[in-house]
C-alpha cells in the first residue's frame, strides 16, 4: 500500500499488506496469446465441422448453430483483448496485443464502394450462366440470413484471424492462411470441387481487408456474392 511508514503502520495488517487480486483468467490467456492465431484457426475449423454435423437436422439448425458458435468466438476474442490490454504479454508484438487494431483505414464510403465492386467482380464467373429460376419471394428471408452469417464470417476471418496471423507471421501469411481457412470452412457444404474458387474468393476478400483496413467492405462483397448465388447457382 502507498504512503509513508507512519501512515502504513497505523493500519490493520490485512489492509496494510493488501494487494489487488489478479484476474484469474489472466495467466491462462497470457500463456495462450502467442498461439492465438493457431487456436482461432482450430476453433473455426471445429465450428465448420459442427455445422456440417447439424445439416442432417436441417439448414436452419445448422445455420443457427454456426451463428452462435461464431458469436461465441468473438466473445472469447474480445475477452482476450481486454485481459491482454491490462496484462501485456512480453513476447507479443506490440501491434498484436489487440488483434482488431488497424494502423489506417480508408474512408467508409470508399471502402463500401470497393466492397460493392469486388462483390460484383466475384459474380462475373456465374453471370453468364442460366438463371437458377428460384422465386424472388423466397429470397428475402434467405437473403437476410446471409447478411448475418456472411458478416459474422468476415468479422471473425478478416477482422480477427487475418490480423492475428499477420501479427505472428507477416501479411502474406495472414492473407493466405485466412483464405485457406475460408475455403476449408466451406468444404463440408460445397465439396472439394469448389475449394479453388473459395480460396480465390478468400484471397480477394483478404486483399480488400488489407487495402482498406476495414472489415465492412469484405462483408459487403461477401453478401453480394452470396446473394448472386440465389439467382445464378
Image (spheres, rainbow, N blue to C red):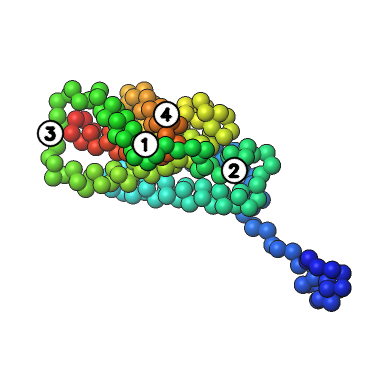
Image quadrant in which you'd find residue 106: top left
Q: Residue 21: horizontal and vertical position, in percent?
A: 69, 62
Question: Which residue lies at the image location 38% right of the left edge and 27% below the top edge?
Answer: 204
Q: Which residue is tagged 3?
A: 133
Q: Residue 3: horizontal and vertical position, in percent?
A: 81, 68
Question: Which residue lies at the image location 18% right of the left edge and 34% below the top edge?
Answer: 231
Task: Tell me: 189 left or right of 162.
Answer: left
Q: Which residue is tagged 4?
A: 207
Question: Which residue lies at the image location 56% right of the left edge and 49% below the top edge?
Answer: 80
Q: Residues within 10 Å of mark 3 (few under 14, many from 20)?
A: few
Q: Which badge, 3 or 2, is on the more N-terminal residue?
A: 2
- Separation of disc 3 and disc 4 at Cα? 33 Å
Q: Residue 77: horizontal and vertical position, in percent?
A: 51, 47
Q: Which residue is tagged 1?
A: 111
Tag 3 secondary structure? loop
Q: Which badge, 1 or 2, is on the more N-terminal residue?
A: 2
Q: Is residue 122 above or below residue 107?
A: above
86 or 63, nearer to the observer: 86
- Separation of disc 4 and disc 1 at Cα? 12 Å
Q: Residue 97 bears which disc, if any?
A: 2
- Separation of disc 1 and disc 3 at Cα? 32 Å
Q: Residues within 10 Å of mark 4 (few under 14, many from 20)?
A: some
Asked whether residue 157 appears in the rendered view, the answer is: no
Q: Which badge, 4 or 1, is on the more N-terminal residue?
A: 1
Q: Which badge, 1 or 3, is on the more N-terminal residue?
A: 1
Q: Are marks 1 and 2 in contact (CB under 8 Å)?
A: no
Q: Residue 154: horizontal and vertical position, in percent?
A: 39, 39
58 or 161, nearer to the observer: 161
Q: Nearer the viewer, mark 1 or mark 3?
A: 1
Task: Tell me: 223 left or right of 170.
Answer: left
Amino acid at each position: 500500500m502507498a504512503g509513508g511508514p507512519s501512515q502504513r503502520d497505523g493500519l490493520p495488517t490485512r489492509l496494510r499488506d493488501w494487494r489487488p487480486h489478479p484476474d484469474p483468467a489472466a495467466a491462462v490467456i497470457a500463456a495462450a496469446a502467442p498461439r492465438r492465431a493457431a487456436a482461432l484457426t482450430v476453433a473455426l475449423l471445429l465450428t465448420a465441422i459442427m455445422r456440417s454435423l447439424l445439416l442432417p437436422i436441417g439448414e436452419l439448425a445448422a445455420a443457427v448453430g454456426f451463428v452462435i458458435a461464431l458469436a461465441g468466438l468473438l466473445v472469447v476474442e474480445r475477452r482476450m483483448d481486454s485481459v491482454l490490454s491490462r496484462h501485456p504479454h512480453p513476447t507479443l508484438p506490440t501491434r498484436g496485443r489487440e488483434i482488431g487494431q488497424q494502423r489506417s483505414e480508408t474512408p467508409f464510403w470508399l471502402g463500401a464502394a470497393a466492397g460493392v465492386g469486388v462483390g460484383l467482380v466475384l459474380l462475373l464467373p456465374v453471370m453468364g450462366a442460366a438463371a437458377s429460376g428460384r422465386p424472388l419471394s423466397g429470397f428475402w428471408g434467405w437473403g437476410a440470413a446471409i447478411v448475418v452469417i456472411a458478416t459474422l464470417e468476415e468479422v471473425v476471418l478478416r477482422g480477427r484471424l487475418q490480423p492475428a496471423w499477420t501479427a505472428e507471421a507477416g501479411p502474406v501469411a495472414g492473407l493466405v492462411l485466412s483464405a485457406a481457412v475460408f475455403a476449408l470452412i466451406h468444404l463440408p457444404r460445397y465439396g472439394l470441387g469448389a475449394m479453388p474458387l473459395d480460396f480465390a474468393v478468400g484471397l480477394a476478400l483478404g486483399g480488400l481487408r488489407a487495402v482498406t483496413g476495414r472489415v465492412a467492405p469484405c462483408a459487403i462483397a461477401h453478401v453480394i456474392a452470396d446473394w448472386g448465388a440465389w439467382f445464378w447457382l
